[in-house]
Image (tube, grey):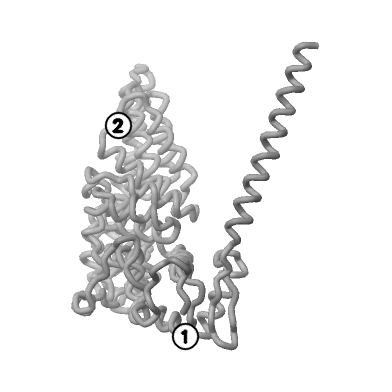
């Protein structure tokens, strides 16, 4: 391999074992240290520990999502069992019937349809609804704004608990006309955001995050953290990974476990870390992720994500991709990441390939294939796609399996920029003279 003139580049032999060497002043990790460092295994997801991170409806929906997308029958039944137990603590008979149907008698008589429980819940729900309607009508008659607001809010809570998300959203939004303080508006926005996330209507999430941020009073740090999480989820759903990363990176430590009905701190680290890897350049990755003290605390909760980010920045691509490979099966069981795993992984891999080739005039594709744990043929196809997409400025010697970089003629490029600047200046001067002549006339 030929190094770039005037630069001290690592040799391919040094890089072959694990990507490339230390860069940007970041020291290389010793071989012995790297060999002793544990690699996250591809063990099945610990469903009980995972479910313990969440509360309320999102806990149930995540368990059901795992049951629907997991290939392991034992994990499926465990997720359904936990979902069944969680549902019976609440009042959502619709979700209850759905889970019982999916269990289909495989967990024994204790997890069969409990018709008596369902009838009792529905009877109490009718009584509760009549009482809420009576109270709300009385509040409307008396024109007490705060009581009317609380009446609609109670209706929203009632509908949400019973799984009528559309009615819950309408009730929460109706409180807006009766809000008298910024605190009331923020509560309305957070309720609307919660229901919108459950309904997968992320345009509403973005709208109500914006409304909450526009309140005149300063927001408490925990509220700001929740809004950042909600905005990050909306950007993630829209596949705006860079915006999603920025929002998750803004989440402060005040979040803690206070938003467990939507997201866990571990999710902030995982979503933010993967989106940043897929969309940030090296400078942003260093300044906004690795050197971000607040986000570092989140990364400590998910050591695998922390290590793969550090490996990517250190150009230890093989190790980074190994972490990603081991995490993939569990990430595909995440209700928010499921649709994005393949895209994020492709973007991260492409960035690794691009960064690998940048320092060199020529690259031996056989050694590069070893570094990325792939075949030369497969690597060649990946590089061809990147060159065609103009992401790598290079050409491939397919016979000798060498990648040659095409470095722009800096002297000619500088001359063209100077010429363009001169032409723009000339046009501006002529325009000024014309305006001056018109004013005099």
With 420 as the anchor, is 116 left or right in this view?
left
With 356 as the anchor, is 46 left or right in this view?
left
User: Could you say whether the residue bearing mark 2 is in a helix, strand or loop?
Assistant: loop
Splitting the image into 4 quarters, where does residue 20 fall? bottom left
63 versus 370 height, above or below: above
Q: Position of residue 345 (x, y in %)?
A: 44, 68
Q: Position of residue 113 (x, y in %)?
A: 31, 66
Lower position in the chain sequence, tag 1 or tag 2? 2
Residue 376 circle label: none
From the image, tell me which residue sits under label 2. 219
The mark lying in front, picked from 1 and 2, is: 1
Pointer 1 local density, CA inside 10 Å: few below 14, some 14–19, many at least 20 = some
Residue extending farthest to the front is 6
Pointer 2 local density, CA inside 10 Å: few below 14, some 14–19, many at least 20 = some
Q: Which sits in the foreground, 23 or 302?
A: 23
User: Could you say whether the residue bearing mark 1 is in a helix, strand or loop?
Assistant: helix
Q: Which sits in the foreground, 89 or 35?
A: 35
From the image, tell me which residue sits under label 1. 366
Q: Residue at x 36, y 69 (%)?
A: 315
Label 1 with label 2: CB-CB less than 8 Å: no
Query: Where, quadrant-wise, is the C terminus in this rendering?
Result: top right
Q: Residue at x 74, y 20 (%)?
A: 435
14 versus 407 height, above or below: below
Q: Position of residue 387 (x, y in %)?
A: 59, 70
Q: Residue at x 36, y 56 (%)?
A: 285
Q: Position of residue 314 (x, y in %)?
A: 32, 66
With 360 as the anchor, is 76 left or right in this view?
left
């Amino acid at each position: 391999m030929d190094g770039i003139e005037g630069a001290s580049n690592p040799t391919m032999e040094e890089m072959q074992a694990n990507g490339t060497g230390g860069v940007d002043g970041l020291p290389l990790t010793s071989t012995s240290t790297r060999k002793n460092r544990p690699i996250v295994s591809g063990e099945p997801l610990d469903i009980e520990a995972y479910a313990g991170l969440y509360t309320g409806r999102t806990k149930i929906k995540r368990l059901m999502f795992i049951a629907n997308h997991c290939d392991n029958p034992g994990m499926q039944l465990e997720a359904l069992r936990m979902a069944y137990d969680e549902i019976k603590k609440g009042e959502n008979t619709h979700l209850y019937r759905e889970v019982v149907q999916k269990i289909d008698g495989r967990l024994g008589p204790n997890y069969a349809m409990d018709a008596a429980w369902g009838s009792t819940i529905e009877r109490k729900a009718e009584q509760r609804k009549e009482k809420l309607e009576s109270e709300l009508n009385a509040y409307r008659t008396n024109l007490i704004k705060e009581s009317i607001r609380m009446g609609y809010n109670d209706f929203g809570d009632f509908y949400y608990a019973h799984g009528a998300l559309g009615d819950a959203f309408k009730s929460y939004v109706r409180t807006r006309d009766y809000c008298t303080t910024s605190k009331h508006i923020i509560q309305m926005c957070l309720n609307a955001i919660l229901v919108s996330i459950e309904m997968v209507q992320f345009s509403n999430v973005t709208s109500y995050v914006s409304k909450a941020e526009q309140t005149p009073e300063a927001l408490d740090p925990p509220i700001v953290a929740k809004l950042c999480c909600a905005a990050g989820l909306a950007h993630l759903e829209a596949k705006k990974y860079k915006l999603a990363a920025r929002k998750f990176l803004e989440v402060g430590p005040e979040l803690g476990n206070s938003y467990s009905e939507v997201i866990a701190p571990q999710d902030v680290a995982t979503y933010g870390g993967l989106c940043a890897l897929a969309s940030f350049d090296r400078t942003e990755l260093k300044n906004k992720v690795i050197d971000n003290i607040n986000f570092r605390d989140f990364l400590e909760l998910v050591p695998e994500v922390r290590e793969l980010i550090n490996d990517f920045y250190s150009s230890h691509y093989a190790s980074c991709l190994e972490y990603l490979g081991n995490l993939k099966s569990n990430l595909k069981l995440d209700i928010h990441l499921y649709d994005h795993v393949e895209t994020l992984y492709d973007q991260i891999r492409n960035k690794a390939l691009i960064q690998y080739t940048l320092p060199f005039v020529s690259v031996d594709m056989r050694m590069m294939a070893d570094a990325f744990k792939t075949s030369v043929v497969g690597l060649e196809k990946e590089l061809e796609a990147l060159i065609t997409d103009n992401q790598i400025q290079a050409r491939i010697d397919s016979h000798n399996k060498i990648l040659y970089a095409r470095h722009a003629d800096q002297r000619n490029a500088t001359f063209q920029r100077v010429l363009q600047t001169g032409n723009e200046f000339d046009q501006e001067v002529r325009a000024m003279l014309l305006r001056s002549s018109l004013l005099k006339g």
